[in-house]
Image (cartoon, rainbow, N blue to C red):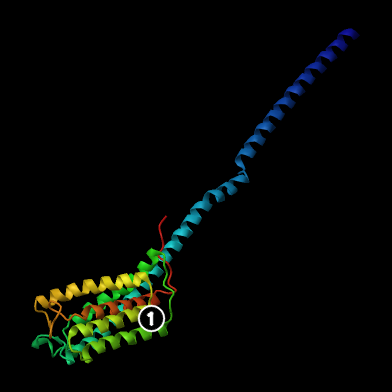
Amino acid sequence: MPRLESCAWSCSGTARGRHRSQLGGTAAGLAAKVGEMLSSSVPSPSLPLVGRAARSPSTSSASSTASSTSSTLNWSQHLVQRSVVLFVVGAFMALVLNLLQIQRNVTLFPDEVISTLFSSAWWVPPCCGTAAAVVGLLYPCIDSHLGEPHKFKREWASVMRCIAVFVGINHASAKLDFANNIQLSLTLAALSLGLWWTFDRSRSGLGLGITIAFVATLITQFLVYNGVYQYTSPDFLYIRSWLPCIFFSGGVTVGNIGRQLAMGIPEKPHND
């Protein structure tokens, strides 16, 4: 009997141990699963870093786009301002110089337009103003494309002296009396080259001045041929032979004004 009781106690103890071990294993498994679920539900600290890294290229791209847009607006604003200033200067100079030519009977307009603004045709100021705006914007643009920035006498005092010399050349064309137009033309040609040498001395300025003189002479020939106006004593087809010298010196003068206005402006942005 004692042996049976001890055997029974030992069997029951063994069963209890097995049951406890099974319960402990089940509890440990449940705890491990709960821990996995909690760890998966909590966000990893590396995710915000990844988000910042993902957002940084787009942020830099947006800032570069905004700065490019701002540069474009500033460049366009400066371009409009320079165009307006050049147009006003060209229109005013055309009125004054054309009035001088009319008073000296060098340029003759039809009788119906003599009583208009400053005894000149209505289309003279806007045409000359537009030409001045184009030429004044073209000079610094050509300098930029050629990679030869104009640095000779870049100051407003020099520009004002250049304008005074140009007005003097135009005044001489109407006031000076020579034996023939050829002598006057040679004199004005020397004065025009002297103006370029004194205030410009750039190859782009010389080339653009010659091109402007050639194109403007052709346009003037066309206008005179169609009877829009005329010159007295023409010796170069329908015009005076010294007129290309006036166009050359005028192109150099307006070009220097445009170059001076272009100083300190932002460069035109380039799209990569």
Q: Position of residue 40 (x, y in %)?
A: 61, 38
Residue 222 location, quadrant: bottom left
Q: Which residue is mark 1?
A: 198
Residue displayed at 35% across by 67% down? 142
Asked whether, in this view, residue 14 is left or right of residue 3, the answer is left
Disc 1 marks a residue whose amino acid type is Thr
Q: Position of residue 264 (x, y in %)?
A: 44, 74
Residue 91 location, quadrant: bottom left
Asked whether, in this view, residue 39 is left or right of residue 83, the answer is right
Quarter holding the N terminus?
Answer: top right
Q: From the viewer's perspective, is residue 96 above or below residue 45?
A: below
Q: Position of residue 228 (x, y in %)?
A: 11, 79
Residue displayed at 29% across by 81% down? 190
Q: From the viewer's perspective, is residue 9 above or below residue 265?
A: above
Residue 39 location, quadrant: top right
Residue displayed at 39% across by 74% down? 262
Instruction: Tell which of 113 and 108 is nearer to you.
Output: 108
Query: Can residue 91 be seen at all in this image of the molecule?
Result: no
Label 1 environment density (alpha carbons within 10 Å; few <14, some 14–19, many ≥20): some
Instruction: Tell which of 255 and 243 is nearer to you.
Output: 243
Quarter holding the C terminus?
Answer: bottom left
Asked whether, in this view, residue 123 is left or right of residue 69, the answer is left
Asked whether, in this view, residue 119 is left or right of residue 62, the answer is left
